[in-house]
Image: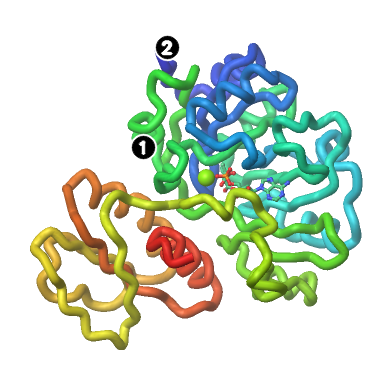
Amino acid sequence: MKTILTDSAEKAARILNSGGIVAFPTETVYGLGASIYHPEAISRLFRAKGRPMDNPLIVHIYSIDQLPEVAAEINAEATKLIERFFPGPLTLILKKNPGVPYTVTAGLESVGVRCPANPVAREFLRFSQCPVAAPSANLSGLPSATSWETVFEDLAGKIDSLLRDKPSSIGLESTIVDCSGPKPLLLRAGAITLEQLQSVVPDIMESTVVDPAKPPKSPGLKYPHYAPKASIVLYTAQDNIAVGNSSSASIGMSEAPAGVSLFKVCQNLDEYGQELFRFFRLCDAEGISTIYCELPSNEGLGRAIRDRLIRAAGVC
Ligand code: TXA
Ligand code: MG
């Protein structure tokens, strides 16, 4: 199959409306979209990524007017979060509208809903005549794609079209909050921080804090994620790192450890988030065998970066 590259949101949406699978930009990472009403496109999407069928997809909308078409119930907490953070890098898990097929939600009665802020994403979603189910546009298990070139590397020939835009401004997947149960839970940290969420809904808790022994509430979190081929070694600014071999790299915010052949020193957490997945992929392309990654503190965007690093290292 030939993948049509385009800069036209309208053309990309036309392909999606006729049952195609289309990669598109968002401010978090690129997504791979299909109409929620085209079951064949949804199953092709799972196949193109190599994604397990029990991992539900986030449904993307361009306007909160589309919410009733996707969600059956929006409680007071969800309403506050929507008013404050939509459009943006936040996904809410809500009770699903019966019209949303179980292939999209992997059999769950809940659905993830996101309204991205990226203008090209919004144009694409507006031209699409339906809510758009979209996981991250990468091969399952690899770091999410933060540029159209990376999407092309992973999925060219497997998808119908790729809508090109600038690299994703955030570079980490959306924050996920589960508002479908009795208490709102943070399922995945992201650019909307726990502190920001709690300023609107004070009793939001991290799901791991609730009961670390229970399986994760978000099915996708049980799969290996964000993993480059290189092995990951985590360190903190206080550690004295002894680099073991010549094909090592590092990423962090303090001075790079001596002896690494490739490094990225980020000026702040925003840059660390933007660069992380791109750097992982660069290291793989360069044949790096070990990436030393500095763990930021567990505050603000640091929480999301730590989460991705810990998963990439396979520590949890
Ligand atoms: O920033 C993002 O969220 C990107 C862009 C494209 O929007 N999308 C993304 O999708 O990261 P994906 O499929 O790579 O990750 C979605 C996560 C998975 O861990 C999945 O299990 C979880 O969201 N999820 C989706 N629907 C859910 C539901 N109903 N209940 C619990 N978790 C859900
Ligand atoms: Mg993903």
**Residue 152: image location, x then y, percent:** 37, 29
69 shown above or below 143: above
Image x and y of residue 197, in percent: 70, 69
Classify 10 Å Cα crowding around label 2: few (below 14), some (14-19), many (20 and above).
Answer: few
Mark pair 1, 2: CA separation: 18 Å
Asked whether, in this view, residue 316 is left or right of residue 262, the answer is right
Q: Earlier in the sequence, mark 1 or mark 2?
A: 2
Residue where numbered disc 1 is placed = 150
The disc placed on residue 1 is: 2
Q: Please indicate whether residue 290 sits to the left or right of residue 136 in the image.
A: left
- Please tell me whether mark 2 sits on a helix, a strand or a loop: loop
Looking at the rendered structure, the kind of residue marked 2 is: Met
Residue 271 at least partly seen: no
Report the side of 79 relative to 11 (left or right).
Answer: right
Give whichever of 297, 192 is nearer the camera: 297
How far across and how far down the image is residue 304, in percent?
52, 65
Q: Residue drawn at (53%, 71%), measured in percent from left and top?
A: 303
Q: State the residue in front, 313 or 154.
A: 313
In the image, residue 178 sits, relative to residue 235, either above or below, namely above
**Amino acid type, label 1:** Thr
Tell me whether the residue at label 1 lies in contact with that at label 2, contact meaning CB atoms closer than 8 angstroms: no
- The residue at 31%/88% (across/down) is 238
162 lies above or below 303:
above
Residue 288 image-quadrant placement: bottom left
Circle 1 SS class: helix
User: Residue at (91%, 48%) from the top-left corner?
Assistant: 73
Neighbor class of circle 1 (other Cα within 10 Å; few <14, some 14-19, many 20+) is some
| Numbered disc in front, either 1 or 2 | 2
Which disc, if any, is residue 142? Answer: none
